[in-house]
Each structure stands twice: as structure tokens, then as C-alpha cells.
Image (cartoon, grey):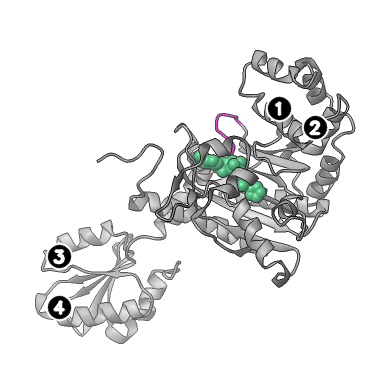
């Protein structure tokens, strides 16, 4: 049986990579004072049809369940987050700072950087409309990537502002919300589409491609919010990690104002992350009962993994993290089968203390047991044999060995194998 296109098996080595990515995301989000939440994997399809909009609606994994409900696997978190906040808005102190890192599903054409199942970190700050909040979120996106060993030479945050495009459109005529949304879709696809296609699409708005290009090249004073953001980021020492790029408008319907995307510097990969303000979403979803400004971003594990692999310093960092989490730290070698009972007692005792311990389930040659110890990544081998109740302790990397008494063993293991309790 073949895998469905765009889905992944996670063999232990793949799981180790995923664990690394999620552990790093969690660690950095918590450094910024964010707390973790989650929602359901399945939602009513209307949640996305009404709120996500754009391309995403055509990419839903939707079906009718046995109760005749039209449902969809979650393609993104933002509408769920908004629903959850609206339901218990009064219970949370503002600003609300939440993150999550689950799996999402989009029926996209499988290609480099795009799968049908992917992991995505979401960080959202709700209840604060200031540029200080914008800066906090962009800084968080930057620090997320720096935590993987990536630098300003490897990635850049491209920042834009939908309000600037709204002002540009308003200067060319009178358009309603739907008109603005349609126009933003044209700008969003500009980089991917042929100029003729964009030219034709722009005709509906009475705007020429030249006018749009001139605005991008020389946006004048329309990006005031960006300038304020830049000052905040520079104060944090983050100059060089971001740039103004008016071509970024984002595909999702709910964004208002500031939007941004993170790309690799070489521009060979898809976006690593994307986000922006969505100041009207809560209000639109609660018929005006809850009005909370919000800003957030999503960062996918697929492109991030590709960027880590393509950046030696980041790849090395990941390798080291994974190597520290081997299956076993201590391998009990049973050199004399008559001592198996004693060995089992010791295995349990050490496991109870938090050591990662493995041992042979059946009789095996000592040489083979040492091989197994190496394969499991163990740092120490504890040999139970004729010396019992004395024990031979061997540090596998250096081949140093010594004889220790049973009650000294835990302390000796601890010093021979520092950091054995890595989570
Ligand atoms: P998005 O731009 O659709 O935004 O996705 C954010 C990131 O998720 C992308 O930059 C990409 O790395 C990853 N991603 C998206 N689709 C796929 C896919 N099919 N395969 C692999 N990776 C993918 C959102 O989803 C917004 N809800 C983010 C947000 C949170 N905005 C505010 N808060």
C-alpha cells in the first residue's frame, strides 16, 4: 500500500527531527511569555469558507460525516483560535499570548515545500493594536529562526501593509471590501503569474501594471507603520533581519494592516512563515460582540526543515540535539547469565532514577552486547559478571574502565554521562 500523496511517515529519525523543531518552537514561544493551547482537528466547513477565504477554500480536505455535517480537517488555526477566544473572552487577561504547534491539512498540489499534511507553529497576540505588538511578533519570528542556528544571512522577514494597498486602490476609484479583497489577490499572485495575466486582472480595477510596479518601486509615505516597526526592531538590535516589500499582501482574507512573510535569503524555497494583523476577525465572527485587535503568524515545519538542511550551522545544531537523545544512555552488559536476576534489579533501579537504560533480552555474546550498546548510542556500559557485587563501568567513547561498588554506581554514571536527564 502506498502513502497518500503529500502525507508523510514519521520513522524514528523523522520523528526526532520533528521533535527537535517542536521543542525549539515551544522553548522560544515560552521565552516570550506565550502559553500553549490546541483545538479540534475537525471543524465545520463554514468556519473556513467564511473566514479564511482566498485559495484556502479550494484546498479544504472536507467531507460529510455520519451525522450529515459538512466538516473539514483544519487547514489553519486562526479561525479556531478566534472562535475559542470569542467563547471565553472575559476569562483572559489582555493581551492574550497563545501558541500551538499541531498538524494541518490542505489539499494542495504536492511540491517542494508544500505537502498535504504539515506541522505549523502559530503564535498570536490578541487585544493589543500598537506597533509595539507588531514588533514583538516580528522579533519572535526572527528569534524562532535564530534558535535553529539560522542568521540574517540565511533568512529575511519581508514586511508590508495592506492599508497602504487600500490607500493605493482608493486613489483609483471607489471599491468595497470585496473589491479590495479581489485586488489584493491579484497583487498576491503577481510574483507567480505571467505579466499578461496580472495586466488583464488589473483591468477590472482600471489600473495598469505600470502603476502597480511604480507603487512597489516607490511607495512614498504609505508605509508609515513599517517605519515605526523598523524603529522598534532596530532598538532590539534586529536591523538586517527585515525589509520592506510591498509585494507581500498574503493570500488569506482576514488580514488587515501589517502583513509579513519570512523567506530564505537565496529565494530558492517557499515562505518559511507568514502572518499579519487581523483586527476585524473577532468582531466579524461574533457579530460585533467581541472587538479585539490581533496579530499572529504561522511557521511551517516543511520549509523550515529544508532551510535547516541547506544551512550547515543549523543542520549541525539539529544533529547535536538529536544525538543527545539516543535510545539509551546506559547499557547493562550481562557477562554471566547467572547474574541476570541481579542485572534486572539494577536495570529497574536505574530507570527509576531517570537514566535511559537498555540491556539484552536474551543471552548474547559480550562482544555483541557492546555492539548493541554503541548502536543504542549509550555513553556507558555497566558490565555485570563474575566481579558482582562489584561492577565494571566502561565509558564507551574513551574505552576507559574501572571497577565500582554497586551503591557508588548512580553517582559515577551521573558524572560519566553529564546531562543524562535530557528531556
Ligand atoms: P499561511 O501563510 O497559510 O498562514 O501558512 C504559514 C506557513 O505555513 C507557510 O509560510 C508555510 O511555511 C506553512 N504552510 C502552509 N501551507 C503549507 C503546506 N501545504 N505544506 C507545507 N507547509 C505549509 C496561515 O496559515 C495563517 N493562519 C498564519 C497566521 C497565524 N496568521 C495569523 N496567525
Q: Local crowd at mark 1 within 10 Å, few (<14), some, or many (≥20)?
A: many
Which quadrant of the figure has residue 30? bottom right
Does any atom of ligand 1 lie closer than 8 Å to the CB of label 2? no
First in residue order: circle 2 vs circle 1: 2
Q: Which mark is residue 187?
A: 1
- Residue 371 appears left or right of 22: left
**The C terminus - image quarter:** bottom left
* Distance between the alpha carbons at the discs numbered 4 and 1: 71 Å
* Distance between the alpha carbons at the discs numbered 2 and 1: 9 Å
Write down the residue under mark 4: 340
Q: Are marks 2 and 4 in contact (CB under 8 Å)?
A: no
Q: Are marks 2 and 1 in contact (CB under 8 Å)?
A: yes
Q: Are marks 3 and 4 in contact (CB under 8 Å)?
A: no
* Distance between the alpha carbons at the discs numbered 1 and 3: 68 Å
Write down the residue under mark 2: 165
First in residue order: circle 3 vs circle 2: 2
For the question of whether residue 150 can be seen, the reply is no
In the image, what residue occupies the spot 18% across and 67% down? 360
* Distance between the alpha carbons at the discs numbered 2 and 4: 74 Å
Element under disc 2: helix
Range of residues picked out in magenta: 266-271
Element under disc 1: helix
Report the mark closest to the observer, 2 or 4.
Answer: 2
Q: Which mark is residue 366?
A: 3
What percent of the width, then of the height, locates residue 237? 76, 49
Amino acid at each position: 500500500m502506498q502513502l497518500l500523496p503529500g502525507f508523510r511517515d514519521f520513522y524514528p529519525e523523522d520523528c526526532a527531527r520533528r521533535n527537535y523543531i517542536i521543542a525549539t518552537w515551544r522553548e522560544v514561544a515560552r521565552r516570550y511569555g506565550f502559553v500553549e493551547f490546541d483545538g479540534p482537528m475537525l471543524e465545520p466547513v463554514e468556519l473556513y469558507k467564511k473566514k479564511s477565504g482566498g485559495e484556502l477554500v479550494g484546498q479544504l480536505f472536507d467531507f460529510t460525516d455520519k451525522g450529515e455535517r459538512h466538516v473539514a480537517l483544519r487547514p489553519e488555526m486562526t479561525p479556531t483560535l478566534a472562535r475559542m477566544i470569542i467563547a471565553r473572552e472575559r476569562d483572559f487577561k489582555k493581551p492574550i499570548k497563545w501558541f500551538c504547534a499541531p498538524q494541518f491539512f490542505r489539499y494542495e498540489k504536492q511540491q517542494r515545500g508544500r505537502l498535504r499534511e504539515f506541522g505549523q507553529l502559530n503564535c498570536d497576540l490578541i487585544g493589543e493594536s500598537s506597533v509595539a505588538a507588531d514588533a514583538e511578533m516580528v522579533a519572535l519570528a526572527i528569534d524562532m529562526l535564530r534558535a535553529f542556528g539560522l542568521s540574517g544571512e540565511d533568512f529575511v522577514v519581508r514586511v508590508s501593509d495592506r492599508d497602504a494597498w487600500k490607500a493605493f486602490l482608493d486613489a483609483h476609484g471607489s471599491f468595497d471590501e470585496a473589491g479590495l479583497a479581489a485586488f489584493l489577490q491579484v497583487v498576491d499572485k503577481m510574483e507567480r503569474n505571467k505579466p499578461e495575466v496580472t495586466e488583464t486582472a488589473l483591468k477590472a480595477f482600471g489600473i495598469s501594471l505600470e502603476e502597480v510596479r511604480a507603487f512597489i518601486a516607490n511607495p512614498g509615505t504609505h508605509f508609515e507603520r513599517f517605519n515605526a516597526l523598523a524603529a522598534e526592531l532596530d532598538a532590539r538590535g534586529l536591523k538586517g533581519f527585515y525589509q520592506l516589500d510591498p509585494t507581500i499582501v498574503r493570500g488569506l482574507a482576514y488580514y488587515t494592516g501589517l502583513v509579513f512573510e519570512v523567506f530564505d535569503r537565496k529565494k530558492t524555497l517557499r515562505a518559511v512563515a507568514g502572518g499579519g494583523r487581523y483586527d476585524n476577525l473577532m468582531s466579524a465572527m461574533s457579530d460585533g460582540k467581541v472587538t479585539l485587535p490581533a496579530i499572529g503568524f504561522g511557521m511551517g515545519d516543511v520549509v523550515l526543515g529544508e532551510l535547516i538542511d541547506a544551512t550547515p550551522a543549523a543542520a549541525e545544531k539539529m544533529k547535536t540535539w538529536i544525538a543527545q537523545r539516543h535510545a539509551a544512555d546506559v547499557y547493562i552488559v550481562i557477562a554471566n547469565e547467572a547474574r541476570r536476576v541481579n542485572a534486572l534489579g539494577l536495570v529497574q533501579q536505574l530507570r527509576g532514577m531517570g537514566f535511559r537504560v537498555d540491556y539484552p533480552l536474551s543471552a548474547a555474546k559480550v562482544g555483541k552486547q557492546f555492539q548493541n550498546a554503541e548502536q543504542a548510542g549509550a555513553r556507558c556500559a555497566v558490565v555485570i559478571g563474575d566481579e558482582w557485587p562489584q561492577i565494571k563501568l566502561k565509558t564507551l567513547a574513551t574505552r576507559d574502565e574501572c571497577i565500582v561498588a554497586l551503591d557508588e554506581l548512580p553517582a559515577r554514571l551521573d558524572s560519566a554521562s553529564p546531562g543524562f536527564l535530557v528531556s
